[in-house]
Image: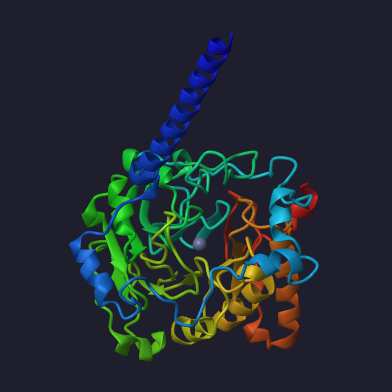
Amino acid sequence: MIYLLLMLVKWVLIFLITLVVVIAVGTVLFLKFAPTFGGRPDATTLARIKASKHFNGETFVNLIPTHASTLDIADITDGVNDDERHLLLQFLFPPKGKNPSQPITSRSLTLINDAKKLSTTLKDGEFVWLGHSTVIFRLAGKIIITDPVFHRASPVPISGKPFAMTHMPSVDDLPFIDIVLISHDHYDHLDHKVIKQLVKQNKAGHFYAPLGVKAHLVRWGVLADSVTEFDWYEEITVSDNDLTQLKPSNPALIENSVQNKRPLVTDELRLVFTPTRHFSGRRIKGHRTTLWGSWVVQSAPLNVYFSGDGGYSNEFANIGEHYGPFDIAFMEDGAYNERWRDVHMLPEESAQAGFDLRAKVVLPIHWGKFDLSTHHWRDPVRRIKQAVAKGNEKVLEDWQIKLASPRVGEGFTLVNLPTEAWWEAED
Ligand SMILES: [Zn+2]
C-alpha cells in the first residue's frame, strides 16, 4: 500500500515538473520567436537611431521629463482621488460600463472597390473613423490610413479584445491604401495581423513609420523598400511619382512657418513626423528603443493632424504655430488615467491641445473600441464634448473648434460634420 502511494506521489511529481518545464520552455520560445513581437532594426536603421539627437545611447527620450506611470504601492492604498482609488481593484473588479453591454451600432464601410484600386467611393476630403486610432481618408487623390488595428490590442489571446460592433471593420473592407501612417509600435496602434493581411491582399502602397518600426513591418512581410522611417521633425513631400524619397532632417525648416514654404500642387502631400510625450515597445524589455510620435499631413486644400498617443505638453502649440492651422485634428481621447497622465491626455487636455494646434475640427480617437483603462467607455467623448464647448466660450469666433463625432464606419466631409451624440443611445 505504501509502495503504491509512493509511486503515485512520484508520478504526480514527475507530471507537475514536466508541466512546469513545458510551460516555461513554451513561454521562453513564445517570447523569443512569436512574430507579434516584431523584428530588430537593421544596420542602417541602427545607425540612424544612434545618430538621433533624441536617443541617449540606450533609449529614445521625450522632449520633457515623462513617466509612463506613477503607480506604486502608495497609490494602490491611498489613491490620488476618489475616482482613482484602488486602481488595481478597479482592474480586477471593473466598474460598470467600462465595456458596452450591447454591440456598438457601427456602419458597414462603403469604400469597397475592385481589388485593382481602379475605383473607390472614398472622395477627396472624406474621412472615416474605424474605431480607436484608425482613420481612413483621401487627400490629393491618395488614400491614407492611420494606425490600422482590427484585432486584439495584445500579444496574447486573453486580453485586448475589441468591443463588439454590429459591423466590425476589417482589412476585407478596405480599398487599396496608398499611404499607411504608423504612430508607434504599441499593440493598440500596430496590429501585426492587419499588416500581414494588407501584404497578402496586396492592399498597401507605402508605409511611413517612426525610427525603429520598419524591422517589425519587414518581419511581417512588408518589403523594406516600401517603408520610410522618420525622426521627429523630419518631413517628406510626396507626389504620385515619388512616394519614397525622404528629405533629411533640417532644423532650419522647422524655424519657418508652413506659409513660407513652397505651396503644394494638386497631387502632392507633405508628411511631417512630429513629437509626442509617450513611449514604445512590444516586449517586456526594451521599451523606448523605437520612436513614437504624431503626423502632420498637408495637401493643397486641407491640413490634417493625427495625434498618435501622448500626454499634454507645450509641443502642441509649437506644432500649431509651425504647421497649423489644421482643418481637422484626430485627437487622442481615451484610455486615460491620472496615474499615466504624462503619456495619455485627459479629455480636457485633448480639447486644450486642439486649441493649441489651432484645429478647426477635432475628431476624438483612441476610444470606442478597447478597454484599456478604468473609465466608462463613453466618458472620453462626453468629457471632450463638454471641454470643447467650454473652451469655445473663451475664444474668438475664428478659433472655435467643431467636434466631429461619427459612428464607427460613417464617412463624413468637413462641410457635413456628424454631430449626433449617438453613444447616449448605446448601453
Ligand atoms: Zn501607446
Q: In this rendering, is residue 328 above or below 19?
A: below
Q: Quadrant of the N terminus?
A: top right
Residue 340 in view of the camera: yes
**381 horizontally vs 292: left or right:** right
Which residue is at the far top?
Answer: 1
Q: Position of residue 169 (x, y in %)?
A: 54, 43
In this view, the residue in front, 74 or 311, is: 74
Q: Position of residue 305 (x, y in %)?
A: 49, 71
Q: Residue at x 69, y 40 (%)?
A: 103
Which residue is at the far left?
Answer: 43
**Protein image colouring:** rainbow
**11 horizontally vs 394: left or right:** left
Q: Position of residue 244 (x, y in %)?
A: 24, 63
In this view, the residue in front, 294 or 95, is: 95
Q: Residue at x 71, y 81 (%)?
A: 391
Residue 172 found in image quarter? top left
In this view, the residue in front, 223 or 111, is: 223
Residue 197 in view of the camera: no
Q: In this rendering, is residue 372 above or below 70?
A: above
